[in-house]
Image: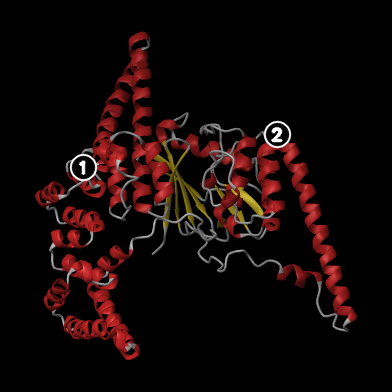
Amino acid sequence: MVMVMRTIANKVGTIQVEGNTFYFLQPLSTFKTDQMDQIQQAYEKRMAALTEQPYYLTAKDLTFQSGQVQFEYDLTGFKAFDHLKSLYFEDKLPYYLSLVRMAKDSSVTVLWQKENFVIDPEEKLVKAAVIENDELHLQNPKSREDAVKELIIISLTSLNRVLGRPRRSDFFEQSEDVIRFAETIFLRLKTLDEMESYLLGIQEEVNERIRLEAEALAQQAADKGRFSFSLSDLIKGRKETPAKTTPQLTLAKNEGKQPKKRVAAKDSNKRFLLGTAGILVVAVLLNIVLTNANENAQATDAGKTEVSEEISLEEVYRQGLLGDDMAVIEALEAIGQDSLKEKDKEVLATLYMENGDYNKAIEADPELAGEVAAKLMEEGKVEELQALEASLEGMSPEVAFELAAASEEWQTVIDLRNQVELMDERIPTIVSAFIQNGDLQTAKAFVNEKAPENEEVLDRLLEVEKQQNELEALKIEKAEKQKLIDTDTDEKKIKAAKERIKQIDQQITELEKGIEVIKGG
């Protein structure tokens, strides 16, 4: 299956990558003309003026798709920008230089967005796909200098956006040289000329160090009568990347990323047992049987009472292995919670859950209240969920969260998001709450931090954001057309404006319906 990456671009456009194909889709209404032939001519004219430039990709096709202009690019042989994360610092320098030189060309405006750039490993250049032309205006909220700085920091760290000074722990390579380089680029250099001069100096130092190392090794080999390698061999040997594996898929979303420094909270041992209950209970039982047998063989006379008890449980567990859960439950209950070992308590709680005796499961282990609440929610048993909440001595954030989700009390869901275990099924619920409250920015920050690999949720957020931006753009355009109708005297213009308003109203209705569908999840 080909991985698809989608993101909002140029405020209301979309970048979509499928395998080696890159698409940029921009609503026709945002162009300076609605004539496709003029849009195509403007693009061809712009690219013809850049044929000698190595930094820009040319679209292989322009088409009109469902109200949007689609630019299609072939990325065979290129890699996603995040591939830089997998390279050693010194190997990134040529790409940084190409970024700075691209930014220095004030005659060309590119979309300064990470997803708009690809890596050309053969030429060691960063290349841009989407650039401005006479009919397409690009919106870049940051200066070229700040955009270049941010892209460099992103490539050096596990960050996907730079909201402030990065921490040392964010860097893949935490040597003093790399940290000093990042601080110089990010904090001290103000102009693109300064950045270019600084990068050239660093590149010269690296090349000199490699040369000296090569000479030293060559001398060492000569002293031993084994001069059998060249400088190119040495350099080749230095090109292993920090990552333990080399990404193969050219534009996979996570291509080239280092092992993550921030990972989602681990599921508790209890949840792991419950998630694989059928198989794992057998494994746990078998482990206990074998453990008890081993302990019995090593028992001393002083421990004969305890050993006798374990011998009796051993037989009970054997029955459990044959599928007789109730025999195990009854035997463990007979011993009593206070007398059970931790491993036996976990088995008892798991068997309670497996057999639907949720109240006993929580009594055996109060921390299972959240697991029970999630299971009842999944089964649609809202009344039982309410009864569970009423039976608890104190307030359980997990139970309250599931009840809030069931009753669509979105603010409560948001308020409790940091007090519950973030199971996979809860992430979409929390995102739905943010969407319903209209807080897309916080929703994106939440997903980027807690579930950055959840493509379905990310795509949903991006689609809502895109459609809302399109809706806002249409409303602005409608207001402008209405103003023309109210103030202009040209009947032809007034007629055209009225026709356009009819189209806009239809588009607004369709967008509003689509947004409601996405909000519902």
What residue is shown at x 29% (from left), y 51% (from top)? 426
Question: Looking at the image, which is closer to me, 128 or 46?
Answer: 128
Residue 205 circle label: none
The answer to whether residue 108 shows anywhere in this view is no
Reply above or below: 258 against 351: above
Residue at the limit of the structure toward the front, as seen here: 302
Reply above or below: 238 against 194: below
**Local crowd at mark 1 within 10 Å, few (<14), some, or many (≥20)?**
some
Residue at the limit of the structure toward the bottom, as seen here: 297
Residue 52 is situated, as x and y percent measured from the top left of the image, at 69, 46
Residue 404 circle label: 1
Secondary structure of residue under mark 2: loop
Residue 53 is situated, as x and y percent measured from the top left of the image, at 68, 46
What residue is shown at x 71% (from left), y 71% (from top)? 237
The answer to whether residue 467 shows anywhere in this view is yes
Tell me the amino acid under the disc marked 2: Lys
Residue linked to disc 2: 190
Residue 153 is situated, as x and y percent measured from the top left of the image, at 61, 46
Reply above or below: 52 against 273: above
The CA span between labels 1 and 2 is 50 Å
Tell me the amino acid under the disc marked 1: Ala
Q: Total number of numbered labels?
A: 2
Closer to the observer: label 1 or label 2? 1
Residue 43 is situated, as x and y percent measured from the top left of the image, at 54, 39
